Image: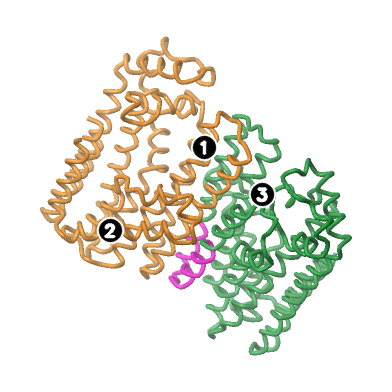
Chain colours: A green, B orange
């Protein structure tokens, strides 16, 4: 509920041109989902057209100003960022799809995986096509750097999988790469349309992106499943080491699991989640995220009052979703 | 052997600046393969650094002129095209990897698939980063369109898999999308650096790309395995319907397999290959490719004599590899 209230408050404060831009974004996403014959629609239509929070395009628009300028280039940047986000979601499904089938792919599953790979590639390509139509090579540079980092963050996550001794610093660097850089790019792309150099906006984006990822990792432990749509401890079963686990191990080394690979399914993962919660690690991780969001807000002092107020609402909204 | 002779002839005719550009390309590819920590090197280093034919970057350089201008932007374009090619190879491995393991992925296999997906994404992203550093939004536009088409071609191939009634037209359209568009983009990107508008160069690239793909499909049937590095009939076992099979079915409907899914392994696939060859379909498919390469050469009449001569050598080289 608080998420919905938060978004509504942002829209109320963002003015008519924000609503108009976000409506045009939905139209463009639906158009892209339906184009390319029926192939894209069949595979990625839901992912890119089905709404979602649209947090990243919202940041693109608000970083450009409040109210945001009614600019075609700005809209294209917002669409491009959301397409890259959609591409990463689709490529994540390449793996999740096979996990759901318990490691036994059929011919259909293999076809599904191939289609997911190609569909993600298509969304990536369309993102760069959108930006190039917007005509700014600087914008292409920002998005290309961010999407390189996203891919590297994904590789980092795989390289670190199952390693219980991942440090907090390494964890935060991975979160920066696999999540926060796209929030940063969203703000930088928006700022290109503001008429001002606003380097602090990029840092703001990165900080709330980090907060977002940490809180996502908290939710994986806390659930409840009816809210998150997945069993608790999914990360544990994937071998992904997150802040709650790192902190819990520091606080209760004796109680920690020796080896994540030994976890046999959701029930055992849920038991580890209970243990993490019992150490107080979730509250500590949450505080860290809230601190990052507060740090982010402190970076906004140079902005016009109205823009600052709306971006503060966004930062609060990221935190409140998890309160 | 004829491939090596062909390439050597092209280099001899292309002048010192061609050799210099292609050397710098190798250095840059090696540099990219070794960057991004050790992660990219571990996963894609071989694919992007290990040489290969470098046919697409060669086209980029030659489309710019003979000798090609010694330009940083041209080099970046050549690198970008080869990175996109590498990304598609790595993403193809996402599927091949699981096929080689006979449909029984282990945790390591699953990790390999995830890494391959992320690595391909990284190569795509780096390609656009290269072009953006080159500073041309027009170049980004050309590559984004081509990489969209490549992904759509891949989706098309999956949509058409196992459908024995795929028409020649549909097959050619798929070849255009999944292969020829990148040859076209290579020529268009090079032409941007020529100082002239050369729309026919893009069409030239597309035609020889089509010839290249048809001949690749002929090789899948003809082998021999010691030359191609894979068993004959791999496409048949994947359900990929290619020109040799389409033509063979037209010529000998009675002898054609009723259902590719029933093929049980390489021996039965090799028997279908023998049948395709017995119908004379391979010679017909080869002739079609040779005709496309000849058509391509006829498009070069407006070019300076030296450039035309070298591009004709490239077209011949594509055909001779399969002679």
Residue A99 horizontal/vertical position (percent): 68, 40
Work out whether B57 lies above or below A113. below
- Is residue B140 rendered magenta in the image? no
Q: Secondary structure at mark 1?
A: helix
Q: Residue at x 65, y 39 (%)?
A: A98
Q: CA distance from mark 3 to mark 1?
A: 28 Å
Residue that carries the numbered disc 2 in the rendered image: B190
The residue nearer to you, when weighing B228 against A319, is B228
Q: Secondary structure at mark 2?
A: helix
Work out whether B251 lies above or below A276. above
Q: Residue at x 20, y 57 (%)?
A: B18
In the rendered structure, which segment of residues is drawn in magenta?
A: A126-147
- Is residue A128 rendered magenta in the image? yes
Corner quadrant of residue A313: bottom right
Residue that carries the numbered disc 1 in the rendered image: B97
Q: Earlier in the sequence, mark 2 or mark 1?
A: 1
The residue nearer to you, when weighing B66 against A4, is B66
Name the side, left or right, on which A208 lies relative to B99. right
Work out whether A72 lies above or below B225. below
Specify the subunit that label 3 lies on: A
Name the side, left or right, on which A43 lies relative to B21. right
Residue that carries the numbered disc 3 in the rendered image: A46
């Amino acid at each position: 509920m608080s998420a919905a209230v938060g978004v509504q408050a942002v829209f109320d404060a963002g003015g008519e041109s924000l609503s108009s831009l976000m409506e045009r974004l939905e139209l463009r996403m639906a158009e892209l989902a339906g184009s390319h014959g029926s192939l894209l629609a069949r595979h990625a239509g839901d992912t890119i057209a089905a709404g979602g929070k649209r947090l990243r395009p919202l940041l693109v628009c608000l970083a450009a100003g409040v109210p945001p300028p009614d600019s075609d280039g700005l809209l294209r940047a917002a669409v491009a960022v959301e397409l890259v986000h959609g591409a990463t979601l689709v490529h994540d499904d390449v793996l999740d799809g096979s996990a759901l089938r318990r490691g036994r792919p059929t011919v259909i599953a293999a076809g599904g995986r191939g289609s997911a790979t190609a569909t993600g590639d298509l969304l990536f390509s369309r993102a760069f096509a959108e930006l190039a139509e917007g005509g700014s090579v600087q914008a292409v540079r920002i998005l290309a750097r961010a999407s390189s980092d996203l891919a590297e963050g994904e590789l980092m996550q795989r390289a670190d999988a199952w390693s219980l001794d991942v440090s907090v610093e390494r964890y935060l660097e991975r979160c920066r790469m696999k999540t926060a850089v796209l929030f940063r790019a969203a703000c930088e792309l928006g700022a290109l349309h503001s008429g001002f150099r606003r380097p602090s906006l990029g840092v703001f984006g990165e900080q709330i992106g980090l907060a977002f990822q940490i809180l996502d990792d908290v939710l994986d432990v806390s659930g409840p499943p009816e809210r998150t749509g997945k069993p608790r401890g999914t990360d544990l079963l994937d071998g992904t080491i997150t802040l709650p686990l790192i902190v819990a191990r520091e606080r209760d080394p004796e109680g920690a699991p020796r080896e994540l690979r030994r976890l046999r399914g959701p029930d055992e993962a849920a038991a580890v989640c209970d243990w993490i919660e019992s150490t107080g690690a979730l509250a500590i991780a949450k505080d860290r995220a809230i601190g990052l969001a507060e740090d982010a807000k402190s970076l906004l002092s140079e902005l016009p009052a109205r823009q600052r107020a709306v971006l503060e609402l966004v930062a609060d909204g990221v935190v409140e979703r998890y309160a």
